[in-house]
Image (cartoon, rainbow, N blue to C red):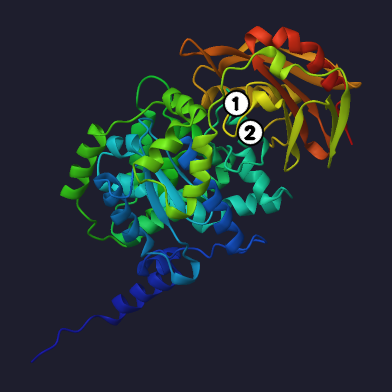
């Protein structure tokens, strides 16, 4: 049998192109990058992630694992997890939050939560796989732990500043006042570089699992084109630039393949998600303060066995009973609290709850495990995106307002002096955890921000129902006068 010869010049030319082309390595398909190393051990990351997950069950309505939507999401998640090399994988787990807003977030060590609103909004299975792959990539690349290392903060502080995951942190306490930040704000601590990296790594996971990575870009474009207010997903995931162009460039040299078609399983899960009872941000905030989600998550079988004790304790002590001013009235005697970096004077009949570089100061009758109706919180932090104290203050206010429906700035940001140092002050209004005739009392919060050492800042937020704020103001001013930065 005669064989057809191939001209030598053609072979030589082809080899020359292959060997010199930058796309040569891409012909075998993209591979996941080495995530690098961090000083935080895997065990520490997993432990903190599980602790944070327990807080989610206290603050948000989570569907049980037996729910058909959750089962579908877990099946899809397991397909994505199989694409990750064993040495670099994590104990990923996937859960669904009964929230109508489009959002998703990942916790260190593997827990991932998807809102039913996200499932309902996805146009096809590949888009949902893209969202989940993006969140998995934050865990895979250990973004939270890397940030903790780069900013010389402890990982517990990063988690706390990101949204109240850890009970001992300042924002953990803020999440139990009228200022309800919620678990999803962990994402706000990811940098734009982290977001770009999560897009790129997520695209690889999608491709290896058989999904067209461009659908991740399509999902972001679909959200951008929605009318009205910006979807929460875009607020929590800072845009690293032109996401669509970046993803298109990333995948341009990858070998063509037949991607997975949309599935009936996705369409069924989407219909189920649309019909699922879902709650808005305000309802979830109110439910967290009243302990509703902790109780209902236990009743519905949503809470893992390992977290039941903590969630049950939260449900039992979530609500504040009727409190009158005499029960919280500060004494005229003050004592000093001192912790690394700052000290403050406070009424001797109030108690302190130290956290990591923070302290919550409250009267016993004015606070429970899940709520603070009276008191003050002091914390240090940093805002690398702000170039002035005014911008730091505005960023804090915007974050509070974005995460707390009903929370609003009242009046302008004012220049003040705190122990001779330049500072800013602003009033906030919201809903108190205390109720009257079945409705929350109006709450007044006074936020004061001043500079700290090495680019940090220190802020204090004073909290009280509006009706009692004037009576407490002299004591709050005395506490502020006693604030020292070391």
Residue on which the image places disc 1? 177
Q: Nearer the viewer, residue 48 or 186?
A: 48
Q: Residue furthest right?
A: 420
Residue on which the image places disc 2? 173
Residue 278 percent across, percent down from the top left: 33, 30
Residue 195 percent across, percent down from the top left: 51, 45
Is 330 left, or right, of 267 in this rendering? right
Q: Nearer the viewer, residue 153 or 160?
A: 160
Quadrant where the N terminus lies?
bottom left
Quadrant where the C terminus lies?
top right
Let me know if residue 74 appears in the view.
yes
Up-down relation of residue 218 to residue 458 (above or below) = below
Residue 199 percent across, percent down from the top left: 45, 48
Whether residues under marks 2 and 1 lie with C-beta atoms below 8 angstroms apart, the answer is yes
Q: Residue at x 34, y 51 (%)?
A: 213
Query: Which element type, helix, strand or loop, lies under badge 2?
Result: helix
Q: Residue furthest left?
A: 1
Is 168 left, or right, of 183 in this rendering? right
Q: Residue furthest bottom?
A: 1
Occupied quadrant, residue 5: bottom left
Q: Residue at x 23, y 32 (%)?
A: 275
User: How many labels, in total?
Assistant: 2
Classify mark 2: residues with Cα within 10 Å, few (<14), some (14-19) or many (20+): many
Q: Nearer the viewer, residue 229 or 204?
A: 229
Q: Residue at x 69, y 28 (%)?
A: 364
Q: Nearer the viewer, residue 86 or 300?
A: 300
Residue 9 percent across, percent down from the top left: 31, 78
Is 422 left, or right, of 425 in this rendering? right
Classify mark 1: residues with Cα within 10 Å, few (<14), some (14-19) or many (20+): many
Let me know if residue 263 appears in the view.
no
Label placed on residue 478: none
Query: Which element type, helix, strand or loop, lies under badge 1?
Result: loop
């Amino acid at each position: 049998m005669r064989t057809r010869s191939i001209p030598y010049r053609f072979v030589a030319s082809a080899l020359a192109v292959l060997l010199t082309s930058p796309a040569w390595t891409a012909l075998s398909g993209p591979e996941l990058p080495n995530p690098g190393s961090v000083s935080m051990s895997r065990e520490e990351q997993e432990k903190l992630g599980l602790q944070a997950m327990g807080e989610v069950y206290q603050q948000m309505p989570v569907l049980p694992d037996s729910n058909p939507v959750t089962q579908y999401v877990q099946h899809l998640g397991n397909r994505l997890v199989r694409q990750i090399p064993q040495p670099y994988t994590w104990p990923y787990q996937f859960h669904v939050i009964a929230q109508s807003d489009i959002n998703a977030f990942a916790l260190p060590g593997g827990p991932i939560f998807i809102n039913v609103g996200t499932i309902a909004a996805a146009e096809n299975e590949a888009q949902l796989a893209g969202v989940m792959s993006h969140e998995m990539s934050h865990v895979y690349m250990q973004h939270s732990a890397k940030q903790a290392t780069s900013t010389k903060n402890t990982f517990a502080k990063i988690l706390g500043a990101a949204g109240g995951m850890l009970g001992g942190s300042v924002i953990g306490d803020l999440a139990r006042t009228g200022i309800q930040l919620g678990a999803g704000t962990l994402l706000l601590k990811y940098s734009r570089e982290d977001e770009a990296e999560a897009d790129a790594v997520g695209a690889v996971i999608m491709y290896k699992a058989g999904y067209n990575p461009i659908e991740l870009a399509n999902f972001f474009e679909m959200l951008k084109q929605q009318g009205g207010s910006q979807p929460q997903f875009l607020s929590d995931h800072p845009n690293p630039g032109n996401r669509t162009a970046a993803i298109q460039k990333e995948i341009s040299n990858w070998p063509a393949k037949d991607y997975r078609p949309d599935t009936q399983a996705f369409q069924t899960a989407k219909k189920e998600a649309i019909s699922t009872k879902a709650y808005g941000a305000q309802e979830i905030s109110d439910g967290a303060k009243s302990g509703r989600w902790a109780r209902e998550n236990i009743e519905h079988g949503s809470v893992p066995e390992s977290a039941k004790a903590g969630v049950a304790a939260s449900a039992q002590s979530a609500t504040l009973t009727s409190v009158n001013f005499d029960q919280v009235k500060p004494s005229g005697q003050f004592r000093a609290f001192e912790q690394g970096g700052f000290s403050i004077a406070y009424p001797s009949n109030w108690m302190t709850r130290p956290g990591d570089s923070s302290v919550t100061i409250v009267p016993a009758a004015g606070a429970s495990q899940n709520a603070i109706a009276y008191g003050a919180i002091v914390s240090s932090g940093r805002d690398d995106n702000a170039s002035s104290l005014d911008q730091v203050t505005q960023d804090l206010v915007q974050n509070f307002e974005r995460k707390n429906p009903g929370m609003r700035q009242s009046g302008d940001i004012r220049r003040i002096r705190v122990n001779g140092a330049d500072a800013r002050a602003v009033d906030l209004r919201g809903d108190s955890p205390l109720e009257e005739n079945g409705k929350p009392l109006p709450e007044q919060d006074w936020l004061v921000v001043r500079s700290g050492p090495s680019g940090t800042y220190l802020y204090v937020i004073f909290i009280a129902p509006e009706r009692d704020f004037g009576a407490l103001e002299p004591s709050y001013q005395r506490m502020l006068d006693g604030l020292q930065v070391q």
